Amino acid sequence: MTPELKSLTWILALQLVMWVPYVLNLILVRGLIDAVGYPDEPKPMAQWAERMKKAHYNSVENLVVFAALVLVAHVAGVSNDTTVMACTVYFWARLVHLVAYTAAIPWVRTLAFFVAWGALVALLLQLF
């Protein structure tokens, strides 16, 4: 497996567990019955859980682009120091984004987002 595909695998693993903390909070706040149901007036999750949910959604939206770029690079046989570094940077930037968003650290969250975006641009440029 190429380093780029390993990075994609790590991102996918992160996606698989990102929802767990905020869903556990939902269950703790609302109880299991209301958490799996559709209460008329649902109790709100903790603010950190709401932010984590938003970070998760943002990560899913960006995963589409990252996965497509990694897979196109793999099929095209494009793998070099830049693609490996971009994939590594993308993973860590998305992890920092998740933590900063959840902890309500605005400048760090925004910086992490743009670093991850820059990694996507670097991957794209390698395909041209």
Image (cartoon, rainbow, N blue to C red):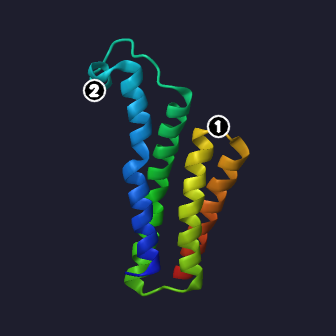
Earlier residue among tags 2 and 1: 2
Looking at this view, name the residue that lies furthest to the right.
107
The disc at residue 36 is: 2
**Quarter of the image that includes the N terminus:** bottom left
How many neighbours does mark 1 have within 10 angstroms: few (below 14), some (14-19), or many (20 or more)?
Answer: some
Q: Where is residue 60 drawn, in percent x and y?
A: 44, 51
Where residue 89 sits, quadrant-wise, is: bottom right
Give the residue number, with chain letter if any, for mark 1. 104
Depth check: 71 or 86 in front?
Answer: 86
Type of the residue with mark 2: Val
Do residues under tags 2 and 1 come within 8 Å of each other at their CB atoms? no
Eyeballing the image, is 43 above or below 90?
A: above
The residue positioned 46% from the left and 79% from the top of the image is: 3
35 left or right of 91?
A: left
Q: Where is residue 88 drawn, in percent x and y?
A: 55, 70
Type of the residue with mark 1: Ala
How many neighbours does mark 2 have within 10 angstroms: few (below 14), some (14-19), or many (20 or more)?
Answer: few
Quick check: can you spot residue 76?
yes
Eyeballing the image, is 33 above or below 54?
A: above
Where residue 106 sits, quadrant-wise, is: top right
39 left or right of 63?
A: left
The residue positioned 60% from the left and 61% from the top of the image is: 117
Between the residue at mark 2 and the residue at mark 1, the CA separation in whole angstroms equals 27 Å
The residue positioned 58% from the left and 72% from the top of the image is: 86
The residue positioned 42% from the left and 73% from the top of the image is: 6
The disc at residue 44 is: none
Figure label count: 2
Eyeballing the image, is 66 above or below 108?
A: below
Depth check: 10 or 72 in front?
Answer: 10
> Circle 1 sits in a helix, a strand or a loop, which is it?
loop
> Circle 2 sits in a helix, a strand or a loop, which is it?
helix
Q: Where is residue 118 drawn, in percent x and y?
A: 63, 65
